[in-house]
Image (spheres, rainbow, N blue to C red):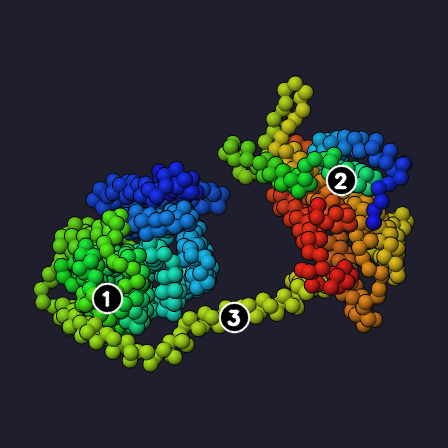
Amino acid sequence: MMQIAVLSGFVLAAFAPLLYRWLGQRTAAIMALYPLAIVVWLLAQWPTVVGGGDPVWLEMAWVPGMDITLTFFIDGLGLLFGLLIAGIGALVLVYAGEYLRGHPDLPRFLVIITAFMMSMLGLVLADNLVTLFVFWELTSITSYLLIGFNHTDLSARKAALQGLFVTVAGGLALLAGLVMLGVAGESWSLAELATRGERLRGHDLYTPMLICLLLGAFTKSAQFPFHFWLPNAMAAPTPVSAYLHSATMVKAGIYLMARLQPSLGGTELWVVTLSLVGGVTMFTGAFLAIRHTNVKKLLAYSTVMALGTLTMLLGIGTEGALIAFVTFLLAHSLYKGALFMVAGILDHETGTKDVTAMGGLRALMPLTSGVALVAALSLAGVPPLLGFIGKELMLDSVLGASHFMALLLLLAFMAAILTIAVAAVVALRPFFGEQRQTPRAAHEPPLAMLLGPAVLAVASLLLGLVPGGLDRLVGVTVAGIGAARAGDVHLALWHGINLPLLISLVALVLGWVTYRRWDRVRARLAYLDPLMARGPEAGYDAVMTAIVRVAEWQTRALQNGYLRNYLAMTLLVLVGLVGHAFFFRHAPQFAFSVDVYLHEAVVAGLMIAGAVTACLMKSRLAAVAAVGVMGFSIALTFVLFSAPDLAITQLLVETLTVILLVLVLFRLPRFANLSAPTERLRDLVVASAFGIMVTLLMLAVLGGERLPRISDYMVENSQPLGHGHNIVNVILVDFRALDTLGEIFVLALAAIGVYAMLRFHAAAPGGRQPTPRREEDDG
Amino acid sequence: MVKSGTLILNVAARFLLPLQLLFSLFLLLRGHDEPGGGFIAGLVAAGAFALYLFAFGLTALRAMIKVSPRDLVGLGLLLALLSTLPAWWQGEPFFTSQWWTIPLIGYKASTPLIFDIGVYLVVLGSVLTALTALMATDRDPEEA
């Protein structure tokens, strides 16, 4: 059901350009009906999942032979994420249709963002580890395409590549981690693994598994020191930032950690790593945010802060912390999505992203400023908004942390101050104060652009006023990710006068002071710029430069265009690897006494004579003829050992080789002896080593104890299973057809390669052909 | 440069071509039970066209086969891939062979045969691509 919906979503994405041709600018709004329908469907599951506390299972096979399923299961966490993805997705589509109105690439945008939406839904609903990974990588790829949407902009392309490299490198680690998880837990189902926590935590692979999985999660969710890609990803159009880089994709890592909490959580390693990394990320994000005047960067760094907070809460891992986690997650998605869309409105209507260039817009865009204010109050954690409840719960659980309580509290306190300042900068600076001249004359945006942020801001407010509506959802979610009971969770605005409230009050005052002195604070922080230039991003750049250097070096060393060097390298590696396995892993027994008939000896002698002659000839034609003698002798051998198919093939190949050579020979320069005697000696050594290696292998195969021969199976089953008497052909087209398929693809590629090389050669008379021809043709 | 051939070669090529092509089809169809098969048959056919190419030249060959050899390669790959689909339809694993008997002539058709025809076309197309590309560099680069 849901699987079909997700897969059909990809089809819908593919048809977006066609729809656009029919429907024009309304396409985005009409396509938004699709995620809206998913929201309705998910809400229909609410009574079962949340009311009854039973996950909904949607079984579906994919690759049964390898235990890979497309089964979806919807529990509290899945439902929460699903609703956020589809709900905000629908709003973002409506918003984007207006934001990118008239943009020539709008159809392309709709394709990618719909594909992303479906990947993300698959990611949070999948039960199977492999399926989860597939959707995970799909989100990385679609995110790459979206960041680089303005592909003519160099910095956008660079940012896209950076995001891709960081998340995909993490994705590789994740794959390793998931495989270890599946092996250690003896299951590929997340739901089953959740019940096997004891075994997993005691397993030998626990530490490497955890490190790999966390690397995947940390890179995806922009945790320190991988946080730098997220602010750079702001090169994407603002609807993308609102959707991928605040509300959904960057939370995939968080989702994974929450999902694994019951399987892997609770150990010393888990608690220490997650709380420390999360705490540091939280502070770093808030601290870096305050340095920027670009409204999108401000919001991006404050997203980093929120992601750090979520990780830290998972690390603390108490029931209170998990309740705080779920509440904070929901609150953040709502207000941050709204704020990003407001940022897009500001950019769209004023023509600048710099908050210091705006001022007094309240009079010109009263609705927008109202929405921004509500969302920013939630970000700052001011009652009666949902963000306040989330922050209070967060502070409360930090106070209950078992490790590094004091440090985490300090980080949380400072992050809270800075976040309040950021919220004030975003919501007050552009709208209040004296009016300023902006590049474009500002006015209220079209309704479609206001709808999204308004809905999210109102939701923040309503859920803050009536938090009781979330009790069951939060309770079921928390029960699903660790805490034992579905719980009597009661979210409330007012908890009485307690320590978290006092901390909040002090932070509010200090945050306000920071905001008032923001210009001076920024000027002071500018002294730190040289230090910032040496941050983790410099490390990323260094790694990328090093990779390019290594690639250049190995291309020069290995791919240097000399056929003889390729050959020598290939043969030596083969001799080395096979020789190592042969002599050090086995104790080969050689059968030196092989019966040889006279005619066999004659054929062998012919081959040797052909090879030696080919090496000594001073004329190309003679060398070709000598090689031909060798080829035909081989065909003769096949005949002697009754393999007519091989013999025919060999003969035909020899013939065609001659034809090809005839065509090539004319183009070659006169025969020249280009190699010095020492080089020829070197070649001799390589060739002899390879020959000896193969000979020894053959002798060992004849001498060693026989493994059960696969050919017996082929001979016996060729007729019953393959319906053919010609075993060779049955193997080629039936038993091993997949290999053959691969081979004909290689053959096709080779033909295309020859064609392309000759065509471009011919198409560039003199000009684009810098390679000296003599080097290429001399083999 | 390759000169379009002598009288004997021309006559021989003209008469041998259909025979060789028939022989290659024969090899292709009987390949499952007797020596032969798509790979060998493809090489034989390629050899036949090569002979024609040497006798009459590139333009004549192009005029005769009409389709581009590269299209043969693509068609072959497509056929080979399509032959994997019937098994999917039957709910059996990827590439499981399917057999049918054609009613009137009693010939047994199968997905391996379709696959083999794909191999045949790929081999033929690849060799012809290389041959014609090499010939074209001699004569008329802009036509390649």
Numbered badge on residue A402: none
What residue type is disc 1 on?
Answer: Arg
Query: Is residue A734 shown above or below A520?
Result: above
Marks 3 & 2 on one chain: no
* Quadrant of res A316: bottom left
From mark 3 to mark 1, how far is it between C-alphas?
A: 44 Å
Numbered badge on residue A436: 1
Residue where numbered disc 2 is placed: B59
Q: Is residue B1 left or right of residue A743?
A: right
Question: Does the rendering let one see residue A691?
Answer: yes
Q: Nearer the viewer, mark 3 or mark 1?
A: 1
Is disc 3 placed on a helix, strand or loop? Answer: helix
A262 vs A544, nearest the viewer: A544
At x 42%, y 42%, the residue is: A17
Query: Is residue B126 shown above or below A579?
Result: above
Subunit that carries the residue with mark 1? A
Q: Are marks 3 and 1 in contact (CB under 8 Å)?
A: no
From mark 1 to mark 2, how far is it between C-alphas?
A: 74 Å
At x 31%, y 60%, the residue is: A351
Q: Position of residue A462 (x, y in %)?
A: 16, 52
